[in-house]
Image (spheres, rainbow, N blue to C red):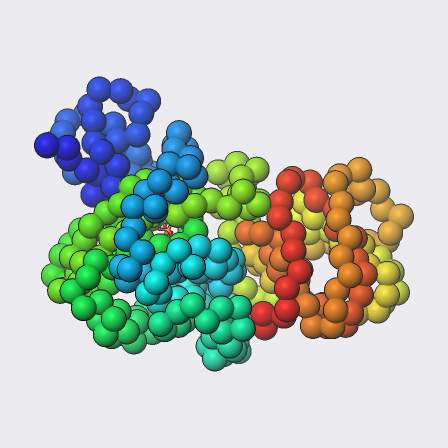
Amino acid sequence: MIKKCLGCGVNLQNNDKNKEGYINSLTQDICERCFKLRHYSHFEQTTFTNDDYQKILDTIPKDSLVVYLVSVLNINLEYIDKFDNVIIVLTKKDLLPKSVKDYKLINYITNMTNHYLEIEVISSLKNYNLDSLLSKIKEHSCGKEIYFVGMTNSGKSTLINKMIKNYSEKTIEVTTSIYPSTTLDKIKIDISDLKIIDTPGLLSTGSILNNLSVKDIKRITPNKEIKPRSYQLKGQGSLIIDNMIRIDYYEDNNITIYLANNLQIVKSSLNNSKLKDCKNIDFDLSARQDIVVEDLCFIKFTKSCRISMYYLYPVNIYQRNNLI
Ligand SMILES: Nc1nc2c(ncn2[C@@H]2O[C@H](COP(=O)(O)OP(=O)(O)OP(=O)(O)O)[C@@H](O)[C@H]2O)c(=O)[nH]1
Ligand SMILES: [Mg+2]
């Protein structure tokens, strides 16, 4: 019988050290990759691709209950229409300033879609709203399997670990990490009378994480409440974010930047040549719009304006209505 890794769901094997699921002895329960991640924070890339994960997601029955996780820092609802019964869970609320109210985030989602049974705003880290989420899951599960779905790093496995701890006697844990593509296959876990299934998340092709080293992924990922940085822009000039993104502006505006607290933002003049030879994209923003640099930051603009953005790495940059 095939034995699966309890940490990431992959088939365990003791034949090929360079393939996923390798372990010295099949008597053990987690693969070497999960072991290194858990005990030494050492991350090994996998050879699996989005296509492999997509095939796994395609096996989820359309009518099952899906808990669809979306990080407040990366709101992507691209795949919810694939499922009939969806509870949308906005995760990592603790990373936004405390002044941001849940109902505002919920309103934001309701303006994007009406394809959901419930919406919940949570923080697994702070145990925030998990009881409320549990009762919503119970209400809609009716004995069916419950799939936890969402982009990579949306916090699926972390939430499952919190639920195991809060609502069961079990001591097992699935593997979680700050790096993309931690969970590699489906993992079935019963929590009280709920049949929960963790799944691998897709990595968006537009994410800046595709271009960064393991060290830089750790550096740019916010790990505590973001302290927004506000600027009263006068006339024209540039802002350079962590030597990766340049924003040229041409008129007065009030803006607020949300990103990891340790990253540097430098104000400079338009004459500065920094990043000027990189690819660029222009935006015409209406009043109260954000610019999102996927998985790096979002920038809240107050007034309508034209800006030019230069970017060191290929990354998806887009405008949306103000989240906050
Ligand atoms: N601040 C904060 N971080 C969280 C929260 N939930 C998860 N994280 C962090 O987000 C990162 C990704 O979490 P995972 O649970 O591994 O994400 P996942 O969705 O299972 O990712 P894949 O397995 O790759 O699909 C980890 O560094 C977690 O610690 C939360 O509520 N607050
Ligand atoms: Mg996971």
Q: Is residue 66 above or below residue 56?
A: below
List x then y, in percent, for residue 144.
19, 61
- In this figure, what is the number of numbered marks? 0
Q: Residue placed at 47% from the left, 80% from the top?
A: 103
Q: Residue placed at 68% from the left, 68% from the top?
A: 289
List x then y, in percent, for residue 310.
74, 46
| Quadrant of the image containing the C terminus | bottom right
Camera-side residue of 276 and 68: 68
List x then y, in percent, for residue 178.
42, 48
Residue 141, picture quadrant: bottom left
Q: Is residue 268 above or below residue 6?
A: below
Q: Residue placed at 52% from the left, 36% from the top?
A: 213
Q: Is residue 234 above or below residue 181?
A: below
- In the displayed structure, does residue 6 sit left or right of residue 18? left
List x then y, in percent, for residue 218.
49, 46
The answer to whether residue 25 is seen in the rendering is yes
The answer to whether residue 105 is seen in the rendering is no
Q: Residue placed at 74% from the left, 72% from the top?
A: 287
| Quadrant of the image containing the N terminus | top left
List the single residue furthest toward the top: 15
- In the displayed structure, does residue 230 sit left or right of residue 144? right
Camera-side residue of 321 and 80: 80
- In the displayed structure, does residue 123 sit left or right of residue 259? left
- In the displayed structure, does residue 61 sit left or right of residue 91? left
